């Protein structure tokens, strides 16, 4: 009897030991498989942690175009792993300049995935994990095509300027990017600064994120619209992200080529806006309404309405400042090539999108009183690049992975 009891105790102890030893390699196997999968896809700043049955992964995608193609590729790669190397559920945190941007929760059933802006808890689980394939110091050389059209003369149908504007973009520390751009005229029938080789966007940009869905940006340098100075912005986005609010303020001076010389002025012009956004999920509409103070002191409101057709974005806008109306349209079209090459020390590439905004009125009071002037702090600012509404991202991912 004692021998039987002793045998049962030994058998139970052996079962517990082998069970524990069996669980540990399984956890490591899932983590290692996830790391190798993302490395093979060319993702950067990869961190992986296993908690119970959930595998949490953070990564930066500098390979796939847009906000959702990289997520779809990661999902398909993880779900193609052998069953023993898959977690029961995944949390995927997408980084942008190493700042958390989106969280995708992937259960066993892919169709039940969820997307939100609430990355705080997932990032806490990754605290202390070492990053693989770091991106600091890597350089992209990007060749931006530019088109300018203006209709305000009686002696010509349109003023036209076509430029090629190469930019060097270097990743520095977390959230920081250094950009240097030069504008090379290809063709113009205008006689102002547009006929000269001139500086483009030359900036140091610092992005940051605070707990609770608050994110911000601080930029200093040379901007578009012939402006130079500093610009700061904040925005708040709830987890589901259909409504967003934000504000920005800038202090700038003129930065223009006169007679082939680069001439800058004192930074004394204050501009800014307070804005709200609604992302309509059914038709992919994005509606932005802003109260604005523009570069030369005119104040009013701007309304933008965009529709997102996958990676193509088209929209119209209206601007009312100092009692004068203006408006126009804008679009962003994907440049062919859904994937870029893996980054080494230096990579040459085209931008992800070609974007253009057309303004109806340039002359009259808008020209004489300098109304409606604004600027951008990035050379790649457009309606498609940063669009990450959770409902839209989920819809497009499911369209790809359930083909």
Image: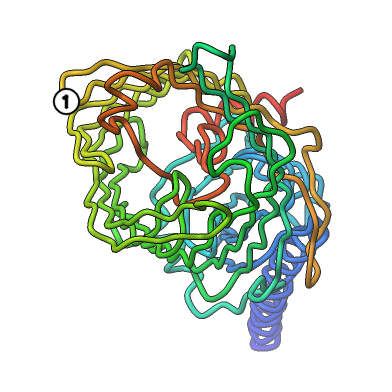
Given residues 251 and 35, the one toward you in this image is 251
Q: Is residue 122 above or below residue 113?
A: below
Q: Is residue 73 above or below residue 370?
A: below
Given residues 253 and 382, the one toward you in this image is 253
Q: Is residue 398 left or right of residue 35?
A: left
The picture quadrant where one finds residue 375 is top left
Mark 1 is surrounded, within 10 Å at the Cα level, by few (under 14), some (14 to 19) or many (20 or more) other residues, namely: few
SS label for mark 1: loop
**Image position, residue 264 (x, y; %):** 40, 61
Applied colour scheme? rainbow
Q: Is residue 22 left or right of residue 363?
A: right
Q: Quadrant of the N terminus?
A: bottom right
Which residue occupies 67% across, 74% down?
134
Given residues 307 and 99, the one toward you in this image is 307
Q: Is residue 356 above or below residue 339?
A: above
Q: Is residue 351 left or right of residue 349?
A: left
**Image position, residue 86 (x, y; %):** 72, 54
Which residue has dot 1 on it? 322
Q: Quadrant of the C terminus?
A: top right
**Image position, residue 350 (x, y; %):** 75, 45
Q: Is residue 371 above or below residue 260?
A: above
The picture quadrant where one finds residue 106 is top right
Which residue occupies 47% across, 68% down?
125
């Amino acid at each position: 009897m004692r021998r039987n009891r002793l045998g049962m105790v030994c058998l139970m102890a052996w079962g517990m030991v082998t069970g524990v030893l069996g669980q540990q390699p399984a956890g490591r196997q899932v983590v290692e498989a996830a790391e190798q999968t993302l490395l093979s896809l060319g993702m950067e700043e990869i961190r992986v942690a296993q908690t119970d049955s959930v595998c949490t992964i953070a990564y930066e995608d500098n390979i796939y175009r847009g906000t959702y193609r990289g997520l779809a590729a990661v999902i398909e790669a993880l779900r193609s792993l052998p069953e023993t190397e898959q977690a029961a559920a995944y949390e995927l945190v997408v980084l942008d300049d190493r700042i958390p941007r989106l969280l995708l929760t992937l259960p066993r059933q892919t169709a039940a995935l969820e997307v939100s802006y609430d990355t705080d808890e997932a990032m806490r689980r990754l605290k202390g994990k070492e990053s693989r394939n770091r991106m600091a110091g890597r350089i992209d050389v990007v060749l931006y095509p530019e088109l300018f059209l203006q209709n305000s003369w009686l002696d010509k149908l349109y003023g036209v300027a076509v430029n090629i504007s190469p930019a060097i973009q270097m990743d520095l520390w977390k959230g920081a990017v250094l950009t240097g751009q030069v504008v090379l005229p290809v063709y113009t029938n205008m006689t102002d600064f547009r006929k000269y080789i001139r500086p483009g966007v030359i900036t140091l940009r610092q992005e940051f994120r605070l707990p609770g869905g608050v994110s911000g940006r601080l930029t200093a340098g040379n901007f578009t619209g012939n402006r130079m100075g500093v610009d700061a912005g904040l925005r708040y986005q709830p987890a589901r992200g259909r409504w967003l609010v934000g504000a920005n303020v800038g202090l700038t001076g003129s930065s223009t080529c006169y007679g082939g010389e680069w001439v800058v002025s004192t930074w004394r012009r204050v501009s800014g806006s307070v804005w709200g956004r609604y992302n309509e999920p059914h038709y992919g509409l994005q509606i932005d309404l802003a109260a604005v103070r523009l570069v030369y002191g005119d104040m009013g409101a701007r309304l933008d309405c965009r529709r997102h057709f996958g990676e193509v974005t088209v929209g119209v806008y209206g601007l009312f400042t100092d009692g004068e109306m203006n408006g126009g349209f804008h679009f962003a079209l994907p440049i062919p090539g859904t994937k870029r090459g893996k980054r080494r020390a230096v990579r040459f590439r085209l931008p992800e999108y070609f974007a253009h905004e057309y303004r109806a009125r340039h002359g009259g009071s808008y020209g004489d009183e300098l109304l409606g002037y604004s600027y951008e702090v990035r050379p790649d600012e457009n309606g498609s690049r940063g669009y990450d509404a959770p409902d839209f991202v989920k819809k497009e991912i499911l369209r790809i992975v359930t083909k």
